[in-house]
Image (cartoon, rainbow, N blue to C red):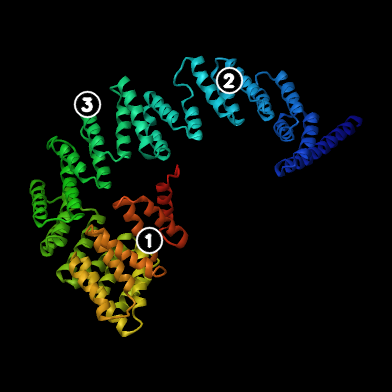
Amino acid sequence: MIRIIFLLILIISSLGLKAQLSSEEALAMQYFQSGDFEKAGILYEKLFNRTKNTSFYDPYFNSLLKLKQFNEAEKLSRSLLKSNPDNFTYSVDIGRIYQEKGDQEKALEWFNTLIRTMPANEFAIKELAITLYRAEAYDFSIKAFMTGRKLLNNENAFNYDLLSLYRFRKDKPNLIQEYINLLSTNPEALPQAQSVLGNILEGSEDFNQLRTSILRRLQKEPQSIVMTEFLTWQYIQQKDFDMALRQTFALDRRLKEDGNRVFDLSRLLISNQAFDQAIESLNYLVSKGVNNNYYIPAKIELLNVKTKQLTSIKFSKENLINLENDFNALINEFGTSQGTVFAIRQLANLQAYYLEKPAIAAQQLEKLMEINGLPSQIIGQIKSDLGDIYILTGEVWEATLLYGQLEKAYANEPLGQEARYKNAKLAYYQADFIWAKAQLNVLKSSTSQLIANDALNLNLLISDNLQNETDTAALRKYAYADLMIFKNQPNKALTILDSIPVLYPGNLLADDVFMAKSKIYIKNNEFNQAIEQLMGIIENYPTELWGDDAVFILADLYETKLNQPDKAIELFQKIITDFPGSLYVIEARKRFRKLRGDKLG
């Protein structure tokens, strides 16, 4: 019985002590976090001395440092180091004391001694380096890892630790060199190297340094595939597409590949509008012969690139006819099949919008739908193309019918929502504004942000211009100009747009006319005229519907077409500050930071 009572007293006392400790610990933490280090130090000293719990050591030690009680701090660290000689926390903290006292020479000597005397043990080396890092002695942390490599006689030891340190220190030269060292033994780390360096390196100087380092390694390891791939990537980042192509050709030949890396590069070249190099890469694949896996895809993609190239510049009729002949030659060679659907759709687009052959284009697409086994989505896309071409041929009812079929067949899918939008826009072209508005009201909540935004803009255009007879008449004229733009008849569209303010002075479409004309000029690469139209919106209608669009489009022109980054930066910043609710804000902020040279990684 006495024993039981004694045990109960012990348990109650223990619980009371724990409760007291918990309360004091919470109070000490509160003082420490609020910066009251004097009170925190007193409590942590009591807690540490009473419990000898090392978890109280760090806040107690740091409180002493903050209070500049260096002798007490050193006495504490040395006493614990004596009983725990293998724990680097206490030895590194002694060096920290010297630093805080301003005795840099003694701190330097102390840290160097720790590194010089560390054992040739990977775990111990890493523990010391990490402890130095936590103490913000970053240079010594790096030195510990580098010395550790020598002790272990392993030049590749601690690769990832050093990469993290160099990245944290923004030490670009050593980061580059460390990745090159890593890739020599771990080629699979190339995507990581590309991702990290792509975010950290900036400007030609940094990338030239990378190229020099890679070339030096290639002199030592001329057969290194990963270094050649790395060099190719570096050329791509610098938009030196000719050199990227040379390297890729060389690697394809050396490894006797089937052209997969050349085909991948061709896609990247197309996305960067490097059409000449893309055509060269695709011709290389075609030259491998009909038995090569990429022969047919390369031939089709070659015509796609030529189409993009010709239709993105001022083209001649002769060039377009030659391109049409190339398409027909391809179809004659491979026939009408699932494999050539994309090429036939491209040919139909060329004939309908650039060669004034919409009827022939429609026949091409109608034949396509007779192919057995076509995926549903492809059939839907062909019908959508065909509906567009029926507008060109004046078969408006047929277009409406096709769009309606698509809307039902692909309800709640982007293809169906796009068809509904096209039907609404067709009604708008025909000046059936009330019906068009009803359709657009539904589409404003489309799951596709692009369709929802287009529907909202068109809906607002119609709503704003139905207030009186004059505005409605001006809107009919404007819709007709829009139809001419759709039909790729820009000169007719410009003539109609120019007539609107003359026929209907004081109408509400001035900013819409500016925007429509700017898009025509941009498509024709007439950038000075486009700038004039966009400035018309920015200066005269900054708060209207197209205000933020005009600023963003102009910024994009200065960045991507006119190579005037300073003007682009100014305009992207204007989007951020003047149009905080704009859909362009996220993209504008990203491009503003990139042009300014901020790190985006």
Callout in the foreground (2, 1): 1
Query: From the viewer's perspective, is residue 117 above or below residue 76?
Result: above
Q: Nearer the viewer, residue 9 or 502?
A: 502
Q: Residue at x 77, y 42 (%)?
A: 27
Q: How many marks?
A: 3
Q: Is residue 323 left or right of residue 116?
A: left
Q: Secondary structure at mark 2?
A: helix
Q: Secondary structure at mark 1?
A: helix
Q: Residue at x 27, y 43 (%)?
A: 268
Q: What residue does disc 1 label? A: 551
Callout in the foreground (1, 3): 1
Q: What residue does disc 2 label? A: 124
Label 2 environment density (alpha carbons within 10 Å; few <14, some 14–19, many ≥20): some
Considering the image in quadrants, where does the C terminus appear?
top left
The earlier-in-sequence mark between 2 and 1 is 2
How far is mark 1 from mark 3, CA to CA? 49 Å
Q: What residue does disc 3 label? A: 254
Q: Nearer the viewer, residue 56 or 544?
A: 544
Q: Secondary structure at mark 3?
A: helix
Q: Which mark is residue 426?
A: none
Query: From the viewer's perspective, is residue 91 above or below residue 408?
Result: above
Label 3 environment density (alpha carbons within 10 Å; few <14, some 14–19, many ≥20): few
Label 1 environment density (alpha carbons within 10 Å; few <14, some 14–19, many ≥20): many
In the picture as drawn, the residue positioned furthest to the bottom comes out as: 469
In the picture as drawn, the residue positioned furthest to the right comes out as: 2
The reply to whether residue 443 is visible in this rendering is no
